[in-house]
Image (spheres, rainbow, N blue to C red):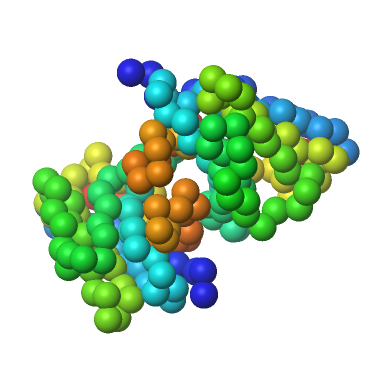
Amino acid sequence: QQQVKQSPQSLIVQKGGISIINCAYENTAFDYFPWYQQFPGKGPALLIAIRPDVSEKKEGRFTISFNKSAKQFSLHIMDSQPGDSATYFCAASMGGNEKLTFGTGTRLTIIP
Amino acid sequence: KAGVTQTPRYLIKTRGQQVTLSCSPISGHRSVSWYQQTPGQGLQFLFEYFSETQRNKGNFPGRFSGRQFSNSRSEMNVSTLELGDSALYLCASRYGGQGSLHFGNGTRLTVT
């Protein structure tokens, strides 16, 4: 019940296109859903996060869509750029708890 | 402001040895967490310290231990190393109970 399932495992998108990564969770006690971006040789960096009281959050080209009833959330990257090529992780935690449960990651490649 | 600093960046140890990894959090951050990242298991929570007290612990054997000092710096120790302990060990810090996690670039541990 603690798992966060992430798909796809890898994704190739053309420059300027929309990249979409999906995550699903089981534990309804989760109340904080961040997305992290990781480049090779670096630690994960927080990209954007959402709490279940809103259905969408947008920051620049990055949008989280959240569906509480379906227990799913997704990351949309608009106008994808080669610099967005990285591994993306969704995560979830509960009650401000430090412990994050991570998805398995999506390797995103943006091609010219 | 300097980010989370982890030392060393790379370590090679032999099976059966022990190892100590170090983490300096962002100035002012009192909470430090440790995660293990492997290709097979992804990112897994090890433990979290706040004001020198372990506040949360993941599902790792007792060979994995940690501590936090009064200046919030943290160390992680792994005793009796096994081949399966080869991983990227990530430290993350945050200011208090609800802030976002900031990760360091990790220590790459190889056990031979």
> Along the line of sight, which residue is nearer the eye, B20 or B8?
B20
Relative to B16, residue A109 above or below:
below
Position in image of residue A92 (x %, y %): 40, 60
Image quadrant of residue B88?
A: top right
Position in image of residue B29 (x %, y %): 42, 29
- Residue at image coords 47%, 49%: A98
> Along the line of sight, which residue is nearer the eye, A1 or B87?
A1
Position in image of residue B8 (x %, y %): 61, 22
- Residue at image coords 61%, 24%: B69
Relative horizontal placement of residue A47, taking residue A59 as reference (left or right): right
Image quadrant of residue A103?
A: bottom left
**Is residue B77 something one can see in this rendering?**
yes
**Is residue A15 something one can see in this rendering?**
no
- Residue at image coords 79%, 45%: B63
- Residue at image coords 85%, 33%: B17
> Along the line of sight, which residue is nearer the eye, B90 or A95?
A95
Position in image of residue B37 (x %, y %): 56, 47
Relative horizontal placement of residue B47, taking residue A55 as reference (left or right): right
Relative to B65, residue A107 above or below:
below
